[in-house]
């Protein structure tokens, strides 16, 4: 019997191998003694990190090149295979060459290159990294964004000091401790009510997106709201349709700047008219399984869809949306 579809792969930015348990970052003696053998992940002012051309690992630096002890702005990321990893601000040295690479959504981007190192961003190139590097890069970016917004106490407005090697701050005036914040957001693949997994999926596009870019619907969880209620509300608000049979699929950190995407599937009646939210959703439409498969098999090139006037590009590989759509499109196909 056909079963409801499940994610067939781990979302790109959910991959990680590094041990980041709290007992590691609250043990100063251990961390300081291991600093000479540690490695550092650099992030520039646009949150890009170096990767050697043709490789799938972040190009880390030796910790000792930054001093005998961790600098004040060093953030501990975790331990893997006997090596501690940290993050520090950094930038390409010298005048970089700009090279053109295909990034997220198939868009061509200009990437700084110094020697054999490309400075890439997480959203466009995180899917090309190995599991360890993807996890390190994702964690480093999430903590970087949090620290940029955690310089002052939320209780009294006093300045803060980093503690726990970057995993908390303490107010210099009132002593209040704060920890990295994560904003939950739902992302839902809505399909029609035909059979177990439906035959059509609901896709939409925002006005600011390039023409032809479509994805599943998403939105932030509000105060006092369950995840399931958020799914129902967001789909109603953004597409003007009711959903049921809401079920959880999986999750992925999305540090742009500090979200976690919680993936769901749900059903809706495809015969009812859609009412896209004015100013937020430019277009919402039902797309067949065959059209979604054609988009996956196009190599990132736009493919025509049923209305004859539109073409479609699916989300980039870094997003859980792509994993969700791929799982749905090839459900029960044996692929």
Image (cartoon, rainbow, N blue to C red):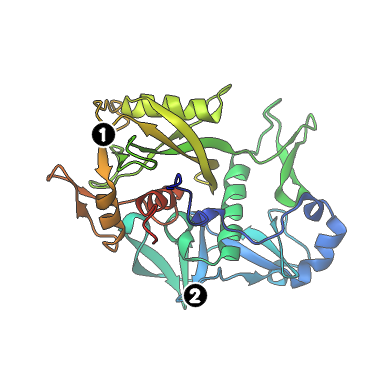
Residue at which label 2 appears? 55
Which is nearer the eye, 297 or 173? 297
Occupied quadrant, residue 66: bottom right
**How far across and down, in percent of the image, does residue 256 sit?**
49, 45
Q: What residue lies at 67% left-to-right and 61% top-to-bottom?
A: 18
Q: What residue lies at 70% left-to-right and 68% top-to-bottom?
A: 63
**How far across and down, in percent of the image, does residue 52 sit?**
50, 74
Marks 2 and 1: in contact by CB < 8 Å?
no
**How far across and down, in percent of the image, does residue 12 sit?**
50, 56
Going from the N terminus, do you reach mark 1 or mark 2 first? 2
Q: Is residue 154 left or right of residue 33?
A: left
Please determine whether, in this image, residue 104 is positioned above or below residue 39: above
Secondary structure, mark 1, is loop
Disc marking residue 282: 1
Please determine whether, in this image, residue 34 is positioned above or below residue 202: below
**How far across and down, in percent of the image, does residue 182 sit?**
60, 39
Residue with the most extreme top position: 224
Residue with the most extreme left position: 308
Q: Is residue 95 visible?
A: no
Q: What residue lies at 63% left-to-right and 44% top-to-bottom?
A: 147
Which is nearer the eye, 58 or 321? 321
Please determine whether, in this image, residue 275 is positioned above or below residue 130: above
Q: Residues within 10 Å of mark 1 (few under 14, many from 20)?
A: some
Distance, label 1 to label 2, CA atoms, is: 39 Å
Q: Is residue 299 left or right of residue 23?
A: left
Which is nearer the eye, 198 or 27? 198
Which is nearer the eye, 107 or 302? 302
């Amino acid at each position: 019997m056909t079963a409801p579809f499940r994610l067939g792969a781990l979302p790109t930015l959910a991959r990680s191998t590094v041990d980041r348990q709290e007992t590691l970052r609250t043990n100063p003696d251990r961390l300081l003694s291991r600093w000479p053998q540690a490695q550092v992940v650099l992030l520039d002012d646009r949150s890009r990190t170096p990767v050697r051309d043709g490789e799938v690992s972040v190009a880390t630096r030796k910790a000792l090149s930054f001093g005998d002890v961790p600098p004040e702005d060093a953030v501990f990321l975790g331990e893997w295979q006997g090596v501690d990893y940290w993050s520090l601000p950094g930038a390409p040295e010298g005048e970089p060459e700009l090279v053109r690479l295909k990034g997220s959504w198939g868009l061509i981007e200009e990437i700084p290159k110094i020697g054999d190192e490309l400075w890439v961003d997480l959203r466009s190139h995180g899917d090309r990294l190995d599991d360890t590097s993807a996890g390190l890069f994702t964690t480093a970016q999430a903590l970087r964004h949090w620290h940029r917004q955690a310089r002052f106490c939320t209780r009294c407005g006093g300045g803060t000091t980093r503690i726990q090697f970057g995993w908390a701050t303490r107010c210099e005036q009132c002593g209040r401790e704060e920890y990295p914040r994560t904003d939950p957001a739902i992302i839902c693949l809505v399909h029609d009510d035909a059979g177990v997994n439906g035959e059509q999926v609901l896709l939409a596009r925002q006005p600011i997106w390039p023409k032809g870019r479509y994805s599943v619907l998403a939105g932030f969880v509000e105060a006092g709201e369950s995840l399931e209620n958020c799914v129902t509300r967001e789909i109603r608000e953004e597409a003007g349709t009711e959903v049921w049979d809401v079920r959880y699929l999986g999750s992925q950190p999305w540090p742009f700047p500090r979200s976690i995407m919680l993936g769901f599937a749900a059903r809706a009646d495809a015969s009812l008219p859609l009412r896209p939210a004015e100013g937020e959703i430019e277009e919402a439409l039902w797309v067949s399984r065959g059209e979604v498969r054609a988009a996956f098999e196009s190599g990132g090139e736009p493919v025509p869809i049923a209305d004859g006037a539109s073409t479609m590009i699916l989300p980039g590989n870094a997003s859980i949306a792509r994993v969700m759509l791929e799982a749905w499109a090839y459900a029960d196909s044996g692929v």
